[in-house]
Image (cartoon, rainbow, N blue to C red):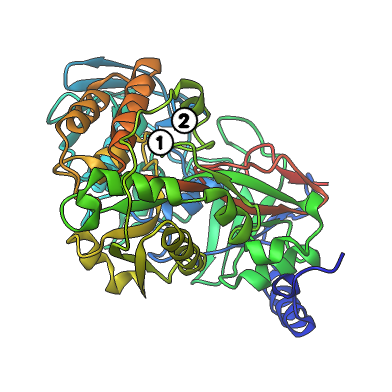
């Protein structure tokens, strides 16, 4: 069967990308013996560093994915807190006490202790801007003794351990904080030491043989930053890279399907309906819009089947959501009768304008008259937040750095939520969101979150359409690369190339 033209990779693009990547990856071996214990892992990353790999920025997720910087706590698949640099913790009101793991050294040879933990957390709290996991959170850290840290918050917070799992709260050696910026080179605690950063082009990591968790199976990692999706796909096809991030949907079809893995992302494409004014102030017209949307055709047509049809706001990246969800009772749909609506979205995510065009057809078939307003995100966000559209299409991360979706639900649907595109003000929703936010982590909190999701969906203020996936490429010789929906892990202690 002949593939659609949009799937075909031009020969010139393959040639150019291959030449580019050959230059990038050639000679990437570090001063360490690249042959010791196996082959070095060549990684093609999508986004170059934006802040010099400072852990106080989004660059922290790169440090985490390379297993060079670590946090006090890590999250399991369910989003529950598990020991990392801290071995145990307990809560007493607003204060949490963390016991620091013994026998851990930083890559510069200095010892991990309570003082080092307090230094890193205090630097994060005082940063400008703060790491987003601390936005609105009053937090102080104090060393109780050499291996005990007390963390106190302004109000009682059941999510402190989950917050401390954020890569932006990585614990680094004192040397990282000399000067105006935070420099993670040689300052982490993970199985790989960051030894060199070449601006926005590449980075080199060597195995750290004194890692507290044992010796990594690979001798090192050679990272190249490749923003162009076609070039990243070509790197996998030509064998120039071992692990490739974020392969575009349009390129995935021409690759060996055994080399790619589709990972469900905690990200939902949602149509937010303006409940405060305009056509969708009428709940029956919101219901009519919901019933008119055929998400399956959007997944198949726009995303070429590489996404999941939404059953709720929370998708398969949070497997417990589907297990707990029950049917939602909606308002009866009214008749649009030619009602005019304007839908806004943005061009920064390539699929969204196409999603908007498909929705336009579906809603017009149902009886609405639909206008589209599509701009760059920077030029449309303020209008969206001000409620200037009848509806807005957004690709939205549903878990923030704590791995917990309660913050996203509050931000987007509480009466005083900071990202309330639907302009929703509903007392039952507010009560459900408050309950979810105050419930202790674990099964009870997950149930409360699903109850809050149901309260939101019952208003038809938001119509979840699909959950995105990220496509990762692993060459044939790659063993045990991580496929992490939260994008915190990629190369681990156990990853190697045959």
Q: Which mark is residue 403?
A: 1
Do the residues under discs 2 and 1 have CB atoms within 8 angstroms?
yes
> x%, y% of residue 441?
34, 21
Residue at 56% in and 64% down = 46
Viewport quadrant of the N terminus? bottom right
Establish if 349 lies above or below 484. Answer: below
| Label 2, label 1: how far apart the Cα atoms are | 7 Å
State the residue lying farthest toward the bottom.
12
Question: What residue appears at the point 36 percent right and 61 percent down from the top-left corner?
Answer: 368
Query: Residue 224: percent from the left, percent from the top?
Result: 61, 66
Where's residue 283, x and y in %? 25, 43
SS assignment at label 2: strand
Earlier residue among tags 2 and 1: 2
- Asked whether 373 or 85 is in front, the reply is 373
Q: Judge whether residue 186 can be spotted in this image.
A: no
Q: Residue at x 72, y 70 (%)?
A: 7
From the image, tell me which residue sits under label 2: 75
Q: Residue 340 in the image: x percent, y percent?
A: 29, 66
Q: Residue at x 47, y 48 (%)?
A: 465
Q: Nearer the viewer, residue 110 or 218?
A: 218
Quarter occupied by residue 80: top left
- Badge 1 density bin: few <14, some 14–19, many ≥20, Cα 10 Å: many
**Helix, strand or loop status at disc 1:** loop
């Amino acid at each position: 069967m002949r593939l659609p033209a949009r799937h075909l990779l031009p020969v010139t693009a393959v040639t150019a990308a291959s030449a580019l990547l050959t230059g990038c990856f050639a000679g990437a071996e570090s001063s360490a013996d690249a042959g010791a214990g196996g082959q070095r892992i060549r990684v093609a990353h999508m986004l170059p560093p934006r802040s010099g790999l400072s852990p106080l920025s989004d660059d922290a997720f790169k440090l985490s994915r390379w297993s060079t910087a670590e946090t006090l706590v890590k999250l399991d698949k369910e989003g529950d807190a598990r020991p990392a640099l801290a071995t145990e913790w307990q809560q007493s009101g607003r204060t949490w006490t963390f016991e620091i793991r013994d026998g851990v050294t930083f890559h510069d040879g200095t010892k991990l202790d309570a003082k080092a933990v307090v230094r890193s957390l205090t630097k994060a709290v005082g940063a400008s801007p703060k790491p987003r996991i601390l936005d609105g959170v009053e937090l102080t850290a104090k060393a109780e003794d050499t291996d005990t840290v007390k963390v106190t918050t302004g109000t009682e917070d059941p999510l402190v351990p989950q917050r401390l799992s954020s890569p932006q709260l990585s614990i680094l050696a004192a040397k990282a904080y000399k000067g105006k910026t935070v420099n993670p080179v040689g300052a982490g605690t993970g199985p790989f030491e960051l030894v060199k950063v070449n601006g926005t082009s590449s980075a080199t990591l060597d195995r750290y043989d004194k890692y507290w968790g044992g010796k990594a199976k690979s001798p090192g990692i050679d990272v190249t930053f490749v923003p162009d999706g076609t070039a990243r796909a070509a790197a996998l096809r030509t064998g120039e890279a071992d692990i490739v991030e974020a392969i575009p949907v349009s390129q995935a079809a021409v690759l060996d399907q055994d080399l790619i893995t589709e990972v469900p992302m905690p990200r939902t494409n949602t149509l937010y309906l303006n409940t405060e004014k305009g056509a969708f102030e009428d709940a029956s017209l919101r219901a009519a819009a919901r019933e008119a949307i055929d998400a399956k055709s959007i997944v198949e047509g726009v995303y070429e089947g590489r996404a999941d049809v939404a059953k709720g706001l929370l998708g398969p990246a949070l497997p417990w959501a589907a297990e707990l969800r029950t049917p939602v009772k909606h308002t009866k749909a009214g008749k649009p009768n030619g009602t005019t609506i304007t839908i806004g979205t943005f061009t920064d995510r390539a699929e969204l304008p196409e999603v908007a065009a498909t929705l336009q057809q579906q809603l017009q078939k149902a009886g609405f008259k639909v206008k589209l307003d599509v701009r760059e995100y920077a030029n449309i966000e303020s209008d969206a937040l001000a409620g200037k559209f009848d509806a807005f299409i957004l690709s939205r991360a549903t878990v923030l750095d704590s791995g917990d979706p309660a913050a996203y639900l509050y931000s987007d649907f509480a009466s005083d939520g900071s990202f309330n595109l639907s302009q929703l003000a509903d007392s039952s929703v507010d009560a459900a969101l408050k309950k979810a936010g105050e419930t202790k982590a674990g099964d009870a909190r997950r149930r409360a979150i699903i109850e809050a999701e149901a309260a939101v969906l019952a208003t038809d203020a938001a119509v979840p359409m699909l959950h995105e996936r990220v496509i990762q490429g692993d060459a044939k010789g790659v063993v045990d690369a991580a496929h992490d929906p939260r994008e915190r892990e990629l190369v681990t202690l156990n990853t190697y190339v045959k």
